[in-house]
Structure formats: structure tokens, C-alpha cells
Amino acid sequence: MNIDRTALAQLLVGGEPIDINPPNVAPEWTSTPSPSFSEGVGGTYNLNQNTTDADGDSLTYAEVSGPWDADVSLASNGVITVTASALEGTYPNLVASIDDGTAAAVNSPSFTITVTPSSADGHRWNPGHYLKVQGKPCVSDQTAWLADVLQKIDNFMDDDPLIRGALVGICWEELNPTGTTYDPSFLNAVLDRVAQSNKYLILQVQAKSFSNDLAPICPADIASDCEVPTKTGQTAAFWRDGTGGFADIGGRYELMIQWLIDNYDQHPNLEIVMTHESAPSFGSVGSPADYSVGALDTALRNIYAVGAGFQKVNFGGNVNNLGTGADDRVPGLVEYLHTQRVMHAGPDAKPANGYQTFEGVQYGTIPPTRDYRTLMGAVYTASEDVIGTGPGDQGKPPAEVIDDEQNHKTTHLAWIPSPSGTTTWTDILNAINADPLLHTTCPSRYLQGCEP
């Protein structure tokens, strides 16, 4: 028997026709997603909890815009997956869409994925190349220097997967204008910029000036005792300890390091804090009467001891050019850096000597007591050359420049000491030359954030 369904429907509702196929209702985003993951663990987040469809249709999800990448991905069923290797920090301005198969796709509100540290006191270490912003940090026009820093980050860092962050020099006087007054504005501006790119900052607090205008490098209230001319500019007289009629220069620098620890140790985008170069660079200018290599060595050890108080951010000592021959203090400082669990940065002006020290080879009359090749666990390079902007490097692809620099041992390298000896120098060199992203073994001290 044939049934007139329309007529039957009219009877059921008193003769008024009804539409048994109502129009489709578009799906909706009911809330802004707020996914959060733990570094080194990762996990999943289902966008179904942020959407609804009045018709009960099955929804299909898709990536629309934002830094979706290999570590942060969205499946068609609405599941966001964050890998364990995702870097700590934020993935902002993400947009996804939902589609019920009938209505037009509906975009989500812009949202952010947060990757938090796996533990409150766990150091992170991201092996890789960092853009070293070349220039002269201690210039009189700090506004222009900041603009130059931000411009170079804009030009070279964002779209280059070889660059994991930026190394930027900020003058000590800029951070600590006078007394116990601290000005974080310059540092915060740079941190905000690298955070936009989900990358990291290596901060070098510059207390040595290569500037032609000889702008102040030390807090104003101690500048007359602190700033000492050298053949390349001027340097902070760290060896002055409050005796002999001079202010306590090293002690004031220690207070600044402690201020950084107190205020920036947990910042998600601050990777490393480094001291200025250890080299006094007096040369033909001559040394002040109160200067001695031994006194500077003592001051640097005290600074490194304070810097070891960073629980999350790494602290680095830039060790090079401290003495010559029998009076060379570099081997002993490398060992002190190791015992303080502080990163060793350099070598720079004396690469052969620095490498010999690292390899356990005697330089001068002060032999290192161990072979550090078996005690170092991670490496980074920081040089503007890696982006092909250094002298003679224009036009070279980054990987070629990196390999060339590494083979000739001319880039700035840094090692984090690993008491357990998780890898060898040979392994590190092989990793550098095999993969410019430097996938190296993570020291046992740094539990998360390292690629195995």
C-alpha cells in the first residue's frame, strides 16, 4: 500500500504542513581552546570540547593558520597532538576550522598552545644555531642599538629553521644604570620579540666595549673606578674588590647577576645568560697598577659561582685570552666552570689554546687535570656567519657556511659540562657536520628539552 507521507503529516498536525527536513544549522565554537602540555611529554587535546552542532552532524576539523608544524598538528577528528620534542614556550595565533559537510567551514577564535617546563627547576637546553647579532652593544645611542637588534632578528631569524634563537649583547650599564636601580626595558623588548617566533634568547651582559664612542659600560655611580681603557675599547675592572681605594666592581656585577636570577630564571624564552669576555685586552695600552691576572681570575670565579644559582636558565662564562704562557688561567677557569656546573663558552681570540684546553692538552705550564671531551654533553654555535652575512660568506647556503666554520674551528662554540660524560667531542663534531641542527646528547643535568 502506498502512503502519502505529506498527507499523513498534515493529519498528524491538524492539517498544517510541516517540513520534515529542517534547514541545516551551522556548527559553532562555544569557547576558545586553551591547550597546555608539558615539555618532554607532549600529549593530545580534543577540540570537541570547544564546539557544538545543533543538528548533531559529524564535524571535520582542519588547520587554518598559525605555527602548525611537525611538533603541533591537528587531525580531522579534532585531536591536537603535541610531540614530546616540542619546545617549551607558546604557539600563539592558531586558528582551526570546523565543517559539518553542509554549511561553510567556521573558523575558531585565535588561540594559543602552551608548552610548560616539565619541572619547576629543570634546565632546558636546545642544541642548535643561534643568530649572533653583530654590533657594538655599549654605544651611547641605545635606542638605535635596540632597533638594530630587532631589525636583524626580523630579517634573519623567523623563517630560518637552522636558527633556534638569538644571541644579543646588552650593556651592563643599560641593565643597571646606577646603584641598585635596574632597567629591564631593553631586555624585555628583545625577549618579547623572540617569544613571537617561539625561539630563545642568549643574553650576553656586555662589560667590555668595542665601541668607538666609548660609551659607558658600567653603572654610572662606579664608572670612574670601573671603566679601564684597552687597545680595543674599554673593559670593566672586575678585579677591583673594594680595596685599594676603588669600588667593588666584581661585587656589583654579582648583584646584577642575582637580580637576573630573581626576575628571569623562569622566563620561558630566556635560554642562557653569559658574562662578557674574560679577556682584558690591555695590550700596548698597558695595565693599571692594581691589575693582575690572578685577581681577575678570582673575580670571575666569584661571578660564576653566583651565576650557578640559576635553576632553569643556563649560565655561561666566556673564557678566553686570560694570560699567556705560564700565567694562562684558562685551563683552571674551565675546570672551575665545570665544578660549578656552568656552561663554558669560547674560545674566541685564541682558538688553538682554547681547544687544547678543552681536549685536555697542556698549554703553558698549567695542565688541565682531565680530558673534557668525555665530560661535555651539548653544543651550540652562535655566529652571524651561519646566515651567510659574515665577511666572504655572502651567498653561501647556511649549511655550507656552518660546515666550513666548524671544520676550521672558527665559530664561537659552547659546551655544557656533563659530569656523567654522556657523549664525546668526536660525537659532537660528527653531529655538527652531519646535521646543522646539532642533534646532540643531552647532559643528565638537563632532563628535558634535548633531542637524543
Image: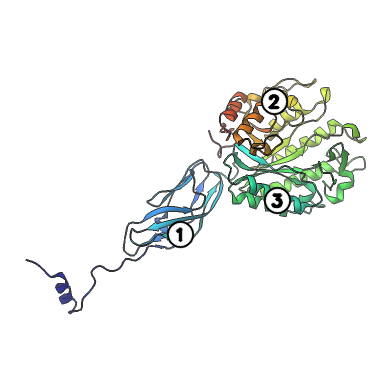
Residue 397, above or below 43: above
Q: Would residue 49 appear left or right of 423 to someone viewing this image? A: left
Q: Which residue is mark 2?
A: 358
Residue 418, above or below 95: above
Which of the 4 image quarters holds residue 313?
A: top right
Q: Residues within 10 Å of mark 1 (few under 14, many from 20)?
A: many
Q: How is the image coloured?
A: rainbow
Q: Residue at x 86, y 43 (%)?
A: 226
Circle 1: residue type: Ser
Circle 3: residue type: Leu
Q: Residue furthest left?
A: 1
- First in sequence: mark 2 vs mark 1: 1
Q: Residues within 10 Å of mark 3 (few under 14, many from 20)?
A: some
Q: Which residue is mark 1?
A: 108
Q: Which residue is mark 3?
A: 187
Q: Which residue occupies the foreground of this view, 37 or 359?
A: 359
Q: Position of residue 300 (x, y in %)?
A: 78, 36
Which of the 4 image quarters holds residue 157?
A: top right
Q: Position of residue 48 (x, y in %)?
A: 39, 56
Q: Position of residue 289 (x, y in %)?
A: 93, 35
Distance between mark 3 and mark 1 Cα atoms: 34 Å
Q: Which residue occupies the foreground of this view, 332 or 436?
A: 436
Say what secondary structure mark 1 lies in.
loop
Q: Residues within 10 Å of mark 2 (few under 14, many from 20)?
A: many
Q: Would residue 229 appear left or right of 107 to someone viewing this image? A: right
Circle 2: residue type: Phe
